[in-house]
Image: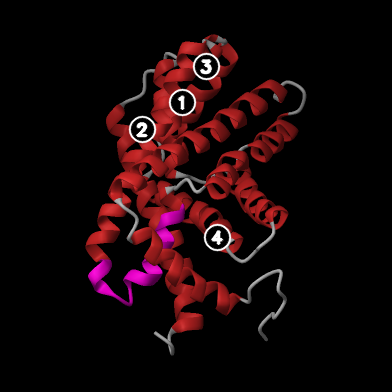
């Protein structure tokens, strides 16, 4: 039964709205996509930095509480992206919902994903550079935390990285999908915060956050193989595509739009 409330859309209306959202994203000039991607990478990197700062600061008080509080801070970056119009690769995996019905958009999809990944990477590296210059990661505790995170990620088995990437984007892209349902600012913030907090707390793999962790670990003095990092990133990106672009976008299109489009 469809929800006719003016405050939110029904699931079918939400799915239909993503057709229009996807067309807009696919037709956005690439220079705009690049800059929006830069901002998206910067914002998510700020959230990732907040996670490290809070979880490490509180670790000696209570490790479990520290993990939860760090996870509670991380969503700030994605909330900033959604409320300011910045773009993330993980959210843009959802635009497959339009491409599957109109294959003429395939080149635009490939260009969009390539440019937004570049923008996200540049934004993430930019923040890592600023933090390195600030001296915050000269603190041995923070340096140890970021290096430990990246060493763990670099040694993940391919299937583990893939699986964690899928699980991550079911939550992250799911939150991006759902926030379009709400017309209310507080509603958007809440629907973004809970799933993103859960993915962070669960230790799933977010490709854009990983673009920040590696350069930050290198700046902090870590000795981690670039090849191992890129290997991890490739499988996480594929997992993020499956989670958002296949399971969610194509799944909801099948449920609600298969007879219409």
Marks 3 & 2, CB-CB < 8 Å contact: no
| Mark toward the start of the polypeptide (4 vs 2) | 2
Mark 1 and mark 4 lie on one chain; the one further toward the N terminus is 1
Marks 1 and 4: which is nearer the front? 1
Distance between mark 3 and mark 2 Cα atoms: 21 Å
Residue in the foreground of this view, choosing between 62 and 51: 51
Residue 164 inside the magenta-drawn segment = no
> Do the residues under discs 1 and 3 have CB atoms within 8 angstroms?
no
Q: Earlier in the sequence, mark 3 or mark 4?
A: 3
Q: In the rendering, at what x and y percent does residue 80 appear?
A: 57, 42
Q: Which residue is mark 2?
A: 122
Q: Which residues are magenta?
A: 91-105
Question: Of marks 3 and 2, which one's residue comes earlier in the chain?
Answer: 2
Please tell me which of labels 1 and 3 falls first in the chain: 1
Q: Residues within 10 Å of mark 1 (few under 14, many from 20)?
A: many
Q: For the point 54% across and 53% down, which residue is it?
A: 172
Q: Residue at x 44, y 31 (%)?
A: 212
Cα distance in 3D space between marks 4 and 2? 25 Å
Point 51% across, 12% down: residue: 134
Point out the frontmost of discs 3 and 2: 2
Give the label on residue 127, or none.
1
Q: x, y percentage for residue 245? A: 41, 63
Relative to the observer, which residue lies in front, 25 or 224? 25
Tag 3 residue: 143
Mark 2 or 1 closer to N-term? 2
- Is 127 placed above or below 28 here? above
Scheme by which the image is coloured: secondary structure
Question: Would you place residue 129 above or below residue 30 in this image?
Answer: above
Question: Within 10 Å of the Cα at label 3, are there few (<14), some (14-19), or many (20+) other Cα atoms?
Answer: many
Q: Which residue is mark 4?
A: 174
Relative to residue 177, is residue 102 drawn left or right?
Answer: left
């Amino acid at each position: 039964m469809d929800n006719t409330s003016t405050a939110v859309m029904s699931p079918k209306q939400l799915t239909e709205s993503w057709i229009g959202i996807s067309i807009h994203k696919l037709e956005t000039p690439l220079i705009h996509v690049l800059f929006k991607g830069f901002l998206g990478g910067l914002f998510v990197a700020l959230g990732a930095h907040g996670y490290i700062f809070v979880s490490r600061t509180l670790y000696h008080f209570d490790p479990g509480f520290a993990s939860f509080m760090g996870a509670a801070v991380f969503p700030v970056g994605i909330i900033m992206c959604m409320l300011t119009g910045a773009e993330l690769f993980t959210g843009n995996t959802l635009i497959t919902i339009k491409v599957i019905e109109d294959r003429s958009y395939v080149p635009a999809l490939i260009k969009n994903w390539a440019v937004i990944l570049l923008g996200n990477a540049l934004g993430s590296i930019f923040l890592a550079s600023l933090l390195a210059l600030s001296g915050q990661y000269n603190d041995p505790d923070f340096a140890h935390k970021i290096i430990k995170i990246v060493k763990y990620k670099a040694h993940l088995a391919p299937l583990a990285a893939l699986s964690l990437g899928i699980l991550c984007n079911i939550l992250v892209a799911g939150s991006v999908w759902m926030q379009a349902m709400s017309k209310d600012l507080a509603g958007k913030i809440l629907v973004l915060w809970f799933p993103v907090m859960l993915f962070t707390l669960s230790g799933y793999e977010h490709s854009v956050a990983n673009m920040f962790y590696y350069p930050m670990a290198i700046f902090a003095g870590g000795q981690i193989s670039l090849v191992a990092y890129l290997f991890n990133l490739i499988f996480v990106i594929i997992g993020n595509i499956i989670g958002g672009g296949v399971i969610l976008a194509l799944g909801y299109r099948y449920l609600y739009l298969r007879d219409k489009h």
